[in-house]
């Protein structure tokens, strides 16, 4: 007969479920959800230039089309966080993925750039909170000892999916087929097919989310103690292969105050969730993490958005045998030659550049896996600071390196700062209590992506007018992020500092 223990704290009860098949399945689902989000948000990087000839878009219109998805993310992230904390992680992930698929796939039938922009805005708004919700779900279903590693590994999914997008564009965009649809007065061609393919992961993840457990910690926070215990028993069964009756927990308690407080109306609930983030003792965490998300996102996201452009210019110079030039000089030479060439390929994507984008993303994904493996040895804060400093210094050194191999390695080092997305998310998951966790993560991501709008415009402008200043400026900001990283709590103090409201 199994002895049952009553009133077990949630973290201990979760640890007693073990780590195994269930956790790996949840990780695969959450990684796939993040990949679906990336496919929707960054699809414009490929669809906007590829559709330019058919839709006859100007440079200004293309800029608006590229910026609308980020605006969709900023305007709705907070709402998704509220819904996840009041209606559940699983339900909101299903709804998010369904709306993302419907709006995203419908964009393939857009008759003009305005309709395309609106549908991409809607699809991006729909998936805007999915990353934060997925991180909250995996964080609340994974034992503490493995949590940071699993959260960090999701960044590999983000990086890999970015590379996969580039690879998918290589065989699809050059296709010459065209089917006329009279009722819409459009030609269904390669870029429209690519759009449909980019939206398919949302449909698959909607089905996967329906089959997944709800977060037991969320259920416990809203008073569904019996359901939370049933899910923990199910997790134990999947991980151990034993009967759920052998799970030694009889009842669980959530070691967070105010978890069961319920407001009567929408605005009361919204205030109950939001105000604690801006009052002691959570105020310090909100200000620090918000600032850190801005510093990291404004730099690395800006480089990721213009990665195909910069790699294309760099590789063009390398292929033509130019030597003894810094990266900025290579970009300037490539731009000048492009401006002088009169071709009909303005709507095509360079195959070599797309292949290099894929290669860079896979290298970064592997580096992220390595970082995940050593996190328990070195610690999150030390790794975060080290990566920030390395990326910042590498950005500055790009202006003095005249060897293209060294410049390529330095540029990859700059892009490695993307690994810190996972570290910041892990800090947010650890520092905030359950009833505001999803909202807090969504708020942090919203601040980060809001800063990205400024960053991508500043970076593109500087690359065209004063390239060296771009690497000095963004390198300096990255270094500043490393210095502020010393204010983050040491790994051993995370759970001690997790505040009870």
Image (cartoon, rainbow, N blue to C red):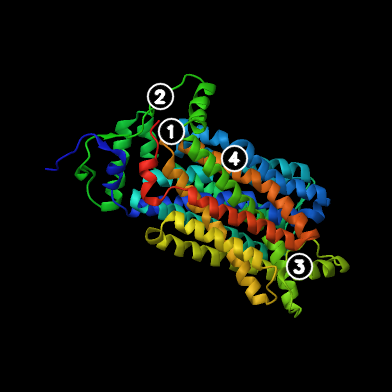
- Earlier along the polypeptide chain: callout 4 or callout 1? 4
Which residue carries the number 1 mark? 435
Q: Earlier in the sequence, mark 2 or mark 4?
A: 4
Comparing 42 with 388, the one in front is 388
Neighbour class for label 4 at 10 Å: few (<14), some, many (≥20)? Answer: many
Q: Nearer the viewer, mark 2 or mark 4?
A: 2
Please state, as top left, top right, bottom left or bottom right, where the C terminus lies in the image: top left
Q: Which residue is mark 3?
A: 331
Q: Which residue is mark 4?
A: 126
Label 3: element kind: helix
> Tag 4 or tag 3, which sits nearer the N-term?
4
1 or 3: tag closer to the N-terminus: 3
The residue drawn where x is 53% and y is 52% is 421
| Mark 2 → mark 1, Cα distance in angstroms | 9 Å
**Contact (CB < 8 A) between labels 3 and 4?**
no
Q: Residue drawn at (75%, 41%), measured in percent from left and top?
A: 115
Where residue 307 sits in the image (x, y, percent)? 67, 61
| Disc on res. 261 | 2
Mark 2 or mark 1, which has the lower sequence index?
2
Q: Are marks 4 and 1 in contact (CB under 8 Å)?
A: no
* Image location (x, y in percent) of residue 248: 20, 42
Which element carries disc 2, helix, strand or loop? loop
């Amino acid at each position: 007969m199994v002895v049952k223990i009553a009133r077990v704290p949630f973290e201990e009860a979760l640890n007693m479920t073990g780590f195994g098949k269930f956790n790996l399945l949840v990780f695969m689902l959450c990684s796939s959800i993040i990949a679906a989000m990336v496919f929707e948000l960054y699809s414009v990087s490929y669809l906007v230039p590829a559709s330019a000839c058919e839709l006859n878009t100007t440079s200004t219109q293309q800029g608006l089309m590229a910026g609308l998805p980020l605006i969709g993310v900023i305007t709705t992230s907070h709402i998704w966080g509220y819904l996840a904390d009041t209606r559940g992680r699983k339900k909101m992930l299903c709804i998010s993925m369904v709306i993302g698929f419907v709006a995203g796939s419908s964009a393939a039938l857009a008759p003009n750039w305005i309709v395309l922009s609106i549908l991409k805005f809607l699809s991006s708004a729909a998936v805007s909170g999915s990353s934060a919700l997925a991180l909250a779900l995996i964080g609340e279903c994974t034992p503490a000892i493995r949590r940071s590693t699993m959260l960090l590994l999701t960044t590999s999914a983000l990086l890999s999916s970015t590379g996969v997008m580039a690879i998918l564009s290589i065989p699809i965009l050059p296709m010459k087929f065209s089917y006329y649809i009279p009722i819409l007065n459009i030609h269904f061609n390669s870029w429209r097919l690519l759009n449909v393919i980019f939206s398919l992961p949302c449909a698959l993840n909607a089905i996967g989310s329906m089959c997944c457990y709800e977060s037991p910690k969320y259920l416990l926070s809203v008073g569904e103690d019996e359901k939370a215990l049933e899910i923990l028993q199910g997790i134990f069964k999947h991980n151990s292969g034993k009967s759920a009756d052998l799970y030694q927990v009889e009842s669980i308690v959530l070691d967070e105050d105010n978890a069961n407080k319920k407001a009567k109306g929408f605005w009361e609930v919204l205030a109950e969730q939001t105000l604690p983030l801006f009052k002691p003792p959570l105020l310090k965490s909100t200000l620090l993490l918000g600032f850190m998300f801005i510093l990291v996102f404004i730099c690395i996201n800006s480089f990721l958005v213009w990665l195909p452009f910069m790699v294309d210019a760099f590789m063009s110079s390398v292929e033509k045998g130019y030597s003894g030039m810094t990266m900025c000089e290579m970009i300037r030479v490539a731009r000048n030659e492009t401006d002088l060439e009169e071709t009909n390929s303005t709507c095509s994507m360079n195959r070599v550049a797309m292949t290099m984008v894929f290669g860079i993303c896979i290298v970064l994904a592997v580096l992220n896996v390595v970082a995940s493996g050593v996190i328990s040895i070195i610690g999150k804060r030390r790794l975060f600071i080290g990566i920030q400093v390395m990326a910042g210094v590498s950005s500055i050194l790009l202006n003095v390196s005249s060897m293209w191999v060294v410049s390529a390695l330095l540029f990859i080092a700059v892009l490695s700062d993307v690994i810190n997305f996972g570290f910041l998310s892990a800090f947010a998951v650890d520092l905030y209590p359950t009833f505001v966790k999803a909202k807090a993560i969504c708020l942090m991501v919203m601040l980060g992506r809001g800063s990205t709008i400024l960053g991508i415009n500043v970076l593109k402008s500087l690359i065209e007018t004063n390239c060296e200043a771009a690497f000095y400026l963004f390198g300096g900001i990255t270094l500043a992020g490393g210095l502020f990283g010393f204010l983050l709590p040491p790994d051993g103090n995370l759970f001690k500092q997790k505040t009870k409201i």
